[in-house]
Image (spheres, rainbow, N blue to C red):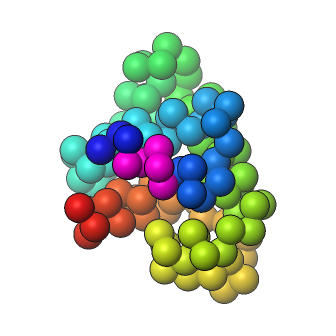
């Protein structure tokens, strides 16, 4: 499943050199495994533990990766995975919406 998440992130335009890319993959896997969980209380701390960093650094790195997606204006890929065009939303998705959106896409498109 991780390989598929990396493919999606490639299509969305998340740069290869960002730590947030790896954190996103782990966060999506965790959400798929445990269902609905708090980002700040469960997901970020678990990702941080695995990568030997802090939850706040995980949150910031993921936020930066999500910003890259929406700054790249890859509207077709965004619409494919999240079901809307960027102009229809103000700015970008939150980290939680992005992660849950990817997890939901993977659940529906096995």
> Residue 39's x, y, as percent?
44, 45
> Residue 63's x, y, as percent?
65, 47
Give 9 or 54, whichever is nearer the viewer.
Answer: 9
84 falls in the magenta region:
no
Q: Residue at left 61%, top 30%? A: 19
Residue 50: quarter of image: top left
- Majority secondary structure of the magenta segment? helix
Q: Residue at left 29%, top 44%? A: 1
Does residue 41 appear in this view?
A: no
Residue 3: quarter of image: top left
Toward the right, the furthest residue is 71
5 falls in the magenta region:
yes
Residue 104: quarter of image: bottom left
Q: Quadrant of the C terminus?
A: bottom left
> Residue 42's x, y, as percent?
36, 37
**Label total for image:** 0
Q: Is residue 40 left or right of residue 72?
A: left
Q: Is residue 94 left or right of residue 17?
A: left
Toward the bottom, the furthest residue is 88
Does residue 15 appear in this view?
A: yes
Q: Give above or below for 31 relative to 59.
A: below
Give 76 or 26, whichever is nearer the viewer.
Answer: 76
Q: Which residues are magenta?
A: 4-8
Q: Residue at left 55%, top 18%? A: 53
> Residue 52's x, y, as percent?
49, 14
């Amino acid at each position: 499943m991780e390989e598929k998440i990396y493919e999606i992130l490639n299509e969305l335009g998340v740069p290869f050199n960002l730590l947030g890319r790896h954190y996103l993959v782990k966060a999506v896997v965790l959400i798929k495994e445990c269902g609905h969980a708090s980002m700040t209380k469960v997901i970020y701390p678990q990702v941080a533990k695995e990568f030997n960093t802090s939850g706040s650094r995980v949150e910031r790195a993921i936020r930066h990766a999500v910003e890259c997606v929406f700054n790249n204006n890859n509207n077709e890929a965004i619409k494919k995975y999240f079901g809307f065009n960027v102009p229809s939303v103000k700015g970008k998705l939150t980290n939680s919406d992005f992660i849950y959106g990817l997890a939901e896409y993977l659940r529906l498109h096995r």
